[in-house]
């Protein structure tokens, strides 16, 4: 009986400790997200909704009435990544969804995601995903069509 009681208390203690640790991690993540200023959130949302448009740091800065150097450094400080990296990451994320969902060519996918150069798109895709767009499509598009 003594061992069962001890095991029961140990289990409760372990679970409580785990929940406290998970709660602390969640609170830290929420704090880091909420520490991004509203103007950076607004720009991030705009990029997510307009990924297909041609954009540069300079054009975004102009559209939002910021100096491009200020916007670049502010974005990096608050998000930990450059504005160009965020734009490319967003576009590659959309490309992954297109490649795995629709039977589009690589060129159509690249242009649909705002890339003007198919070769640059393929280079970036490989950097972000560790495989070419063709390999990605072959792997994930077939899985989705076979499972239906």
Image: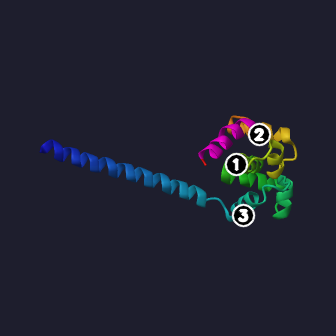
Front residue (pair 22, 141): 141
Q: What kind of element bears circle 2?
A: helix
The answer, for residue 120, to whether it is visible in the render is yes
Q: Is residue 110 left or right of residue 76?
A: right
Residue for badge 3: 42
Front residue (pair 139, 71): 139
The reply to whether the magenta stretch includes residue 24 is no
Indicate whether 95 appears above or below 126: below
Image x and y of residue 77, in percent:
69, 51
Residue 53 figure quarter: bottom right
Indicate whether 128 appears above or below 28: above
Mark 3 or 1: the one toward you: 1
Residue for badge 1: 93
Label 1 CA crowd tier, 10 Å (few <14, some 14–19, many 20+): some
The answer, for residue 67, to whether it is visible in the render is no
Looking at the image, the residue that sits furthest to the left is 1
Residue for badge 2: 124
Front residue (pair 52, 76): 52
Image x and y of residue 65, in percent:
83, 64
The residue segment tinted magenta is 134-147
Image x and y of residue 95, in percent:
74, 48
Name the residue located 69 percent from the left edge and 61 percent from the top edge: 41
Q: What kind of element bears circle 3?
A: helix
Which circle's residue, 3 or 1, is located before the other in the chain?
3
> In what quadrant of the picture does the N terminus appear?
top left
Mark 3 or 2: the one toward you: 2
Which circle's residue, 3 or 2, is located before the other in the chain?
3
Name the residue located 78 percent from the left edge and 47 percent from the top edge: 104
Magenta residues, dominant SS class: helix
| Contact between labelled residues 1 and 2, with CB atoms less than 8 Å apart | no
């Amino acid at each position: 009986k003594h061992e069962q009681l001890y095991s029961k208390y140990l289990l409760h203690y372990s679970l409580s400790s785990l929940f406290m640790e998970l709660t602390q991690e969640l609170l830290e993540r929420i704090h880091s997200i909420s520490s991004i200023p509203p103007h950076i959130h607004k720009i991030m949302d705009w990029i997510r909704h307009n990924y297909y448009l041609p954009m540069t740091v300079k054009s975004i800065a102009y559209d939002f009435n910021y100096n491009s150097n200020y916007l670049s450094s502010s974005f990096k400080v608050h998000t930990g990544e450059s504005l160009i990296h965020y734009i490319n990451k967003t576009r590659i994320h959309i490309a992954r969804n297109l490649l795995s969902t629709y039977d589009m060519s690589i060129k159509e996918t690249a242009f649909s995601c705002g890339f003007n150069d198919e070769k640059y798109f393929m280079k970036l895709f490989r950097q972000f995903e560790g495989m070419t767009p063709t390999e990605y499509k072959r792997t994930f598009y077939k899985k989705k069509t076979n499972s239906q």
